[in-house]
């Protein structure tokens, strides 16, 4: 894989706010992302162990997902490195059956955990059969995109450039 920074949106687009990760990745693909061949935006759907390969091949990983954080719907929070690991270990941190924490553990076991990693969590308002995001979560999409850009810029300043 040529990409060194993977932006992975996860979620089920048929369950309302659960699809926010996919919505962010779609917007990034439409031009909101920095234009560079080393940035790969991937819709990871509802997670699968097949994602272990792209995660392990990335030097840096940014995951965007609906996350139960006990905050107001549409709240966006960024968890980097060890803080990401702690958030993923929370019992209610993810609404997926397959765990992102398990995928990262696979990367640890194979010594391919991305050097830098972050979770951009967005508090859902509505997870039920629906193909649209709730208004507060839809309003959070540009905020999440700004956080993706900020992470990339910060990592670039620290000599961890994805470019």
Image (cartoon, rainbow, N blue to C red):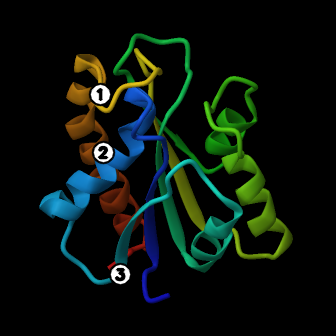
Q: Earlier in the sequence, mark 2 or mark 3?
A: 2
Q: Label 3, label 1: how many angstroms apart (C-alpha)? A: 29 Å
Q: Which residue is mark 2?
A: 23
Q: Position of residue 49 (x, y in %)?
A: 70, 63
Assess disc 1: are there few (<14), some (14-19) or many (≥20) residues with their C-alpha within 10 Å of its C-alpha: many
State if disc 3 and disc 2 touch (CB < 8 Å).
Answer: no
The residue positioned farthest toward the bottom in the image shown = 2
Secondary element at tag 3: loop
At x 56% / y 22%, what residue is drawn? 68
Question: Which mark is first along the chain, 1 or 3?
Answer: 3
* Disc 1 and disc 2 in contact, CB within 8 angstroms: yes
Of the image marks 1 and 2, the number of the one nearer the N terminus: 2
Where residue 135 sits: x, y (%)?
22, 18
Position of residue 137 in the picture relative to residue 113 (left or right): left
Disc 2 from disc 3: Cα separation: 21 Å
Front residue of this view, candidates 34 and 95: 95
Occupied quadrant, residue 139: top left
Q: Could you say whether the residue bearing mark 1 is in a helix, strand or loop?
A: loop
Is the residue 156 above or below the residue 94 in the image?
A: below
Tell me if I can see residue 74 in this picture.
Answer: yes
State which quarter of the image contains the C terminus: bottom left
Q: Which residue has dot 3 on it? A: 38
The picture places residue 136, in percent across and down from the top left corner, at: 26, 18
Dot label at residue 133: 1
Q: Is the C-beta separation of discs 3 and 1 under 8 Å?
A: no
* Mark 2 Cα shell of 10 Å, populated few (<14), some (14-19), many (≥20): many
The residue mark sitting in front, 3 or 1, is 1
Of 99 and 127, the residue lying toward us: 127
């Amino acid at each position: 894989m040529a990409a060194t920074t993977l932006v992975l949106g996860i979620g089920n687009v048929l369950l309302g706010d659960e699809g926010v990760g996919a919505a962010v990745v779609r917007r990034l693909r439409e031009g909101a992302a920095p234009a560079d061949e080393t940035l790969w935006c991937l819709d990871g759907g509802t997670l699968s162990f097949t994602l272990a390969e792209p995660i392990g091949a990335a030097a840096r990983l940014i995951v965007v997902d609906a996350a139960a954080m006990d905050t107001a719907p549409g709240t966006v929070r960024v968890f980097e490195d060890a803080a990401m690991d702690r958030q993923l270990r929370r019992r209610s941190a993810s609404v997926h059956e397959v765990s992102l924490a398990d995928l990262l553990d696979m990367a640890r076991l194979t010594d391919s955990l991305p050097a830098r990693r972050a979770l951009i969590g967005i508090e859902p308002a509505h997870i039920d059969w629906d193909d649209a995001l709730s208004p507060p979560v839809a309003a959070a999409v540009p905020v999440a995109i700004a956080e993706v850009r900020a992470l990339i810029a910060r990592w670039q300043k620290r000599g961890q450039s994805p470019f």
